[in-house]
Image (cartoon, rainbow, N blue to C red):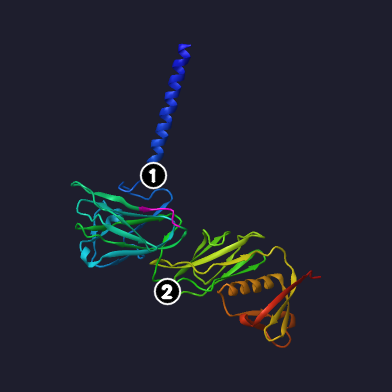
Amino acid sequence: MKQWKSIASKLIMVIFVGVLFFSVQTNTYASAVGDQLTAPEAGWKRFDDTHAGVKYTGNWYTKTDTSYYNGSVKVTTKAADNNYVSFSFYGTKLRLIADLYSDRHSNNTITIDGVTESFSEYRAGSTSLTNALVYEKTGLPLAFHTVSVTVGHNRTNFIMDAIDIDDTGYLINTNLSAPVDLSAAAAIEEINLSWTKVTAATSYNVKRSTTEGGPYETIASSVTNATYIDINVTSDVKYYYVVTAVNTAGESISSNEASAILLGQPGNAILTVYLTNGSEKEYDLSMSEVNAFIAWYENKQAGTGKASYAIDKHDNNKGPFTSRKDYVIFDKILTFSVDEYSAK
């Protein structure tokens, strides 16, 4: 009996130590403000202080040292000149990485979407702590956020080393315009996207979600044309798309959102468009053409897309023409009807 009690006691002790060890091991992955963080943790992505999306106002200089992230930091000593850092990002969380030391300001402020909080870079003693986590904000809505960091004034220096955000987010290149007039047109086994070309953009990222408003997954990058065909789609699923412009300085904010549902089966229909002047136009079209028209109409009704839509008159192409098109004006449409039929 005593032998069984001894074994049970040892087993309980082993379980207790194992749980304690697991708890300690788990907690090592959750850094807190004031900890050294030489690399971003899982679920985070790091951007250096030299990123083109980070703007410095006032008097700043670059200090180099191998102990800093990527070997350099931005430093200011002129708090009276209203020095500040500004940037925008897409995501839900934010961390600031800096160098803690006894000459650092402790009354710095950070404003995120108009809400201001304070943070410190002060560390008592004669040694500094590089790559330190000095500020953290989580639980933000998944959206674009505007950030301004204002330097304090009660000591000597302020350091900016790096910015951590969601590993699915990005810093915004505020000098690059977002694509506009994104439209999505459903066809058989594909969805066709088009948008207005952005000046100074070298490529585009196409992002997709099955939920309105995202979150979006990047399905294509380095797209050089202002069009894209998505062939990895499933029937009866509504897809939501946004596009961002990209150049060497980074990525723009997203375009308007456009959506479409893949056509399930091929077919034909009579599309009748009733105009505000009392007249009507009738077209014999494939269902892919009808759905492309409906997608244009819905996007334009939501405030995006071109004012007119070209319909091919291939069922009545008389004469020596390579093509004939009717251009339907959005604000001249009163209503329209679709009558499907089976082609023989």
Location of mark 2 (residue): 200
| Magenta stretch, main secondary structure class | loop
Q: Residue 303 — which label?
A: none
Give left or right: position of 103 versus 184.
Answer: left
Task: Please give the range of residues in magenta.
Answer: 136-140
Q: Residue furthest bottom?
A: 319
Residue toward you, 86 or 189: 86
Q: Position of residue 75 (x, y in %)?
A: 24, 60
Give left or right: position of 333 versus 250.
Answer: right
Q: Quadrant of residue 182?
A: bottom right
Q: Position of residue 86 (x, y in %)?
A: 33, 64
Question: Which amino acid type is marked by label 1?
Answer: Ala
Question: Which amino acid type is marked by label 2?
Answer: Ala
Q: Residue furthest top?
A: 1
Circle 1 residues within 10 Å: few <14, some 14–19, many ≥20: few
In terms of secondary structure, where does tag 1 sit?
A: loop
Q: CA distance from mark 1 to mark 2?
A: 40 Å
Give left or right: position of 60 versus 213.
Answer: left
Residue found at x 30% / y 47%: 34
Disc with the residue nearer the chain's start (1 vs 2) = 1
Q: Position of residue 27 (x, y in %)?
A: 39, 40
Residue toward you, 178 or 314: 178
Location of mark 1 (residue): 30
Which is in the foreground here, disc 1 or disc 2? Answer: 1
Residue found at x 72% / y 66%: 266
Circle 2 residues within 10 Å: few <14, some 14–19, many ≥20: few
